Image (cartoon, helix red, strand yellow):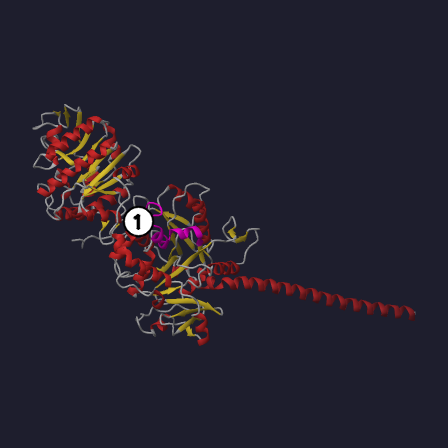
Amino acid sequence: MATKIRIKIKDAKFLHFLSKLMMMLGLFLFFIWMLGFAMLVGFGSFQWERNKDWRSCWDVESMGRITIFSAPKPLKNGSDLVGQRQELAVRSWLALSPDVDVVLFGHHHSIFAFAAKLGPRVAVESEIDFTFLDTPFFHSMVARSQTMPGISIFVDPEIILLPNILTTLCVTSTLNHDWFLVSISTYISYFPYHLDDGGNYWLEYDGDKVNIEKLQDFVVQEQEHRNGSGRLIIAWNSGDLSLHAGVLPPFHYMQGLHNEWLLNEVLSSEFRFVFDASEVISSFYPEQLAEWSHEFRMTNGNVDGRDWEYRGNCEQALLYGSICCQPKNISNNIAKLVKHSGRYVFINPEKDILYSVQGFHGHAYQHLKLVPGQKQGILQLFPRFQLITQEEKLIATGGSDKLDTVSTTCMKLCKDLSVRSSHLHFPYSLESLLQLVADQNKSVVLAVAGDNYKDMLMNWVCRLRHLLVTNFIVCALDIETYKFSILQGLPVFKDPLAPSNISFDDCHFGTECFQRVTKVKSRIVLQILKLGYNVLLSDVDVYWFENPLPFLYSFGSATLVAQSDEYNETVPINLPRRLNSGFYFVHSDSPTIAAIEKVVKHASTSDLSEQPSFYDVLCGEGGLYRIGDNQCLEPSTNLTVHFLDRNRFPNGAYKGLWEKHNVTSACVKQGCIVLHNNWISGRKRKLERQVRSGLWVYDTSSRMCVQSWQRVHFTSYF
């Protein structure tokens, strides 16, 4: 019995020991689990810590989204190297954040397909101004961007952006002042990473994800070995203040100087806090893009036959702003944003006071006015900044000033601009221009204009652009109109035989000046007909409600289709000398060429304008060759002249349309295709009538066509 009791006691001790052992093992496993959980949470916290600045500082509702603007080149095919680089660049922008949108300027069908491929956050904007070779105008791009709230970033179409640009934008959210950011992006020749198919992660070539910090460090190290300037990235918040004083000229995008010009003007105007973020934004572009820099153009001449666009930008920089007469020393006038010991540090222009951002959290601050030239002004701008140590100052200012080369380059350009701009001309002959602009029917729309009607010319051009009519060509009567048209991106040629000393204000119907100018038109039309192209001659004071060409094509060959100048509704429209030679269409065929030759010869010996010569030759003096109420038949050439229905093609005196309260409504109701602004004496009165009627779509102050997204008032035009 005692033995049994001892055995039970031993069993109980063993069970107690076993129970303690299991408890200790459980605690050990729980500790291991907790350690693993803590490590997992710690790793997650580390990952969140990397992005917490971006996640915590950005308020989309109050600050708006980030929109990246660019203008890619039209894509040729799927294997196009330029297209591949552009796609990688845009995908890198989208990978930054879901709060980033992309707007691509262009109207080529390949750009719309490109945007659709990249998803709903990529949009195409075609309602801006383009040259006849489809180069977008920078001033029109900027104007469009300023209609969108939030932050606008302008970047060349092949520049790749890495995520630290978002953290930099978070730093800008601590400013209680409107700002303008600039960063310089240089090229690298080797980049061993690519985005995954979803565009969310950067991968090694073996498919492993690459750490963002490693990626950014790699770009910095590669760029340290590159010399010379690069491509500027510019950004700004929508804010309350303008970017600069004055007007942005019509620079041709990606043809040099527009970013540098804008930076100089923003600095000069002192409306905004301007800083260089080159040290804290990782970006780069493929080496091949360096060939399109303006430094390369200066040393290598005409790269692609379009050097006139670069020369045009030089002309604009010379004529407008202060980049040439009062260039800013950028490195001495711009604040610099750098990062040291985990802190973002601003260096003021004098580089003797530095402040670091305390964090991205906290309440918004009321806007305070910056007093230019006062060192305390930076304290007003940065209420959450603290003075850094002298040691940190030395470290922060130890880097190279990447923007120094921008200032140096602009100074060199300005010394050479006057020489270069004086040779501004097209490398195209009339025949080569016709090949570029003619439509599939080998038809062109011809306008003839001098310096006195430049604004009217541009209003006419803008209306054609709105109607998607691109097959127009301009004959300039003088060098002023020729250069103006080049800068406006128009397909222009100068008539070497045009009369000189054209009056600016007194060249209206009946004047000697008018007679000399009109005779140029028939001579140029004949020249184009002999080159094998059909011609619609349209004076620039003819407003188009719709494209008349589809209707005019229906008349066939050996027919001259012209507007009637008759305003009396009760008489035939083909009465003597009622053929309006300011709007007519002709085919390039033997009867037409022979008939126009007779008109040109007759006009050359006449003391009148060309208009009477058209009627007297084609319809006979006194209307000898009239057929019915709306036609004539020239017997020697067998050319038919058809006078257009005045309800659809009214002249300026017909039914008093120009005097209607709502000219557009009256014309649309009547079925107008065009409306001629004639039967009025004097250039100024003609312009006033056109503007006040609402048939004016050109903003003379900004040199831009008025788009649907603009609100422009012309009450102060005169």
Q: Is residue 711 visible?
A: no
User: Residue 257: x and y, percent?
Assistant: 32, 56
Q: Amino acid at mark 1?
A: Glu
Expressed as whole percent of the image width and height from the top left, the position of residue 261 reads: 31, 58
The answer to which image quadrant residue 209 occupies is: bottom right
- Left or right: 305, with 512 as reference point: right
Question: Looking at the picture, how far across and down is residue 359, in whole percent?
Answer: 45, 69
Expressed as whole percent of the image width and height from the top left, the position of residue 585 reads 21, 33
Between 563 and 288, the one lying in front of the other is 288
Residue 586 visible in image: yes
439 above or below 405? above
Decide if residue 377 is on the left or right side of residue 59. Answer: left
Q: For this rendering, which residue is in front, 327 or 143? A: 327
Mark 1 lies on residue: 309
The magenta span reads 285-308
Q: Is residue 202 magenta?
A: no
- Please determine whether, in this image, residue 41 is positioned above or below residue 296: below
* Residue 300 is covered by the magenta coloring: yes
Side of 313 relative to 8 (left or right): left
Classify the position of the N terminus by image quarter.
Answer: bottom right
